[in-house]
Image: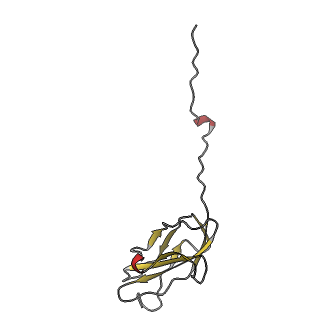
Amino acid sequence: MLGGTNIVPILSVPQAGAITALKPIFQWSMINAATKDDLLVAADTDFTDIIIEKTCGNALNSNAWESDIVPENNTTYYGKVKARSDKSNSGWSAISAFTTVLVAVTKPLLPQSCQPQIPHHRLRP
């Protein structure tokens, strides 16, 4: 087993129970001797409805990844990760559940003292 007996990566972002943006960022602990990492995200805990599959030829070269897939808004998903090398794999990490939300971008209002001043000109007769 890669990394030694019973060593698996720890999926730290998103944290279990987290509320994330629609394009979540994933991060996990590194395992010595790993050359790639597999990431699965599904809509169910059995991982039969997979929405993100970064395995085999699509495996990740680092222990962090920002989703390029936009999952459904206000939906709970489940993620897990495992480390790989050419010779062996770690086990899967514990499953982490997170919920996506649409992040609204709001423009802050300037205080009255910061509003641009429009000069008033008087017309001369």
Above-or-below relation of 68 to 123? below
- Which residue is more in the foreground, 15 or 105? 105
Above-or-below relation of 5 to 111? below
Image point (49%, 67%), residue name: 67
Image point (58%, 13%), residue name: 123
Above-or-below relation of 110 to 95? above
Q: How is the image coloured?
A: secondary structure
In the image: residue 22, left or right of residue 9: right
Q: Residue furthest top?
A: 125
Image point (59%, 35%), residue name: 115
- Which residue is more in the foreground, 5 or 125? 125
Image point (63%, 36%), residue name: 112
Dividing the picture into quadrants, the one containing residue 83 is bottom left
Q: Residue furthest right?
A: 74
The quadrant of the image that shows the N terminus is bottom left
Dividing the picture into quadrants, the one containing residue 99 is bottom right
Where residue 75 appears, as percent x and y from the top left, is: 63, 69
Above-or-below relation of 46 to 107? below
Where residue 63 appears, as percent x and y from the top left, is: 43, 74
Q: Number of marks in the image? A: 0
Where residue 125 appears, as percent x and y from the top left, is: 58, 7
- Which residue is more in the foreground, 24 or 27? 24
In the image: residue 93, left or right of residue 102: left
Where residue 25 appears, as percent x and y from the top left, is: 50, 67
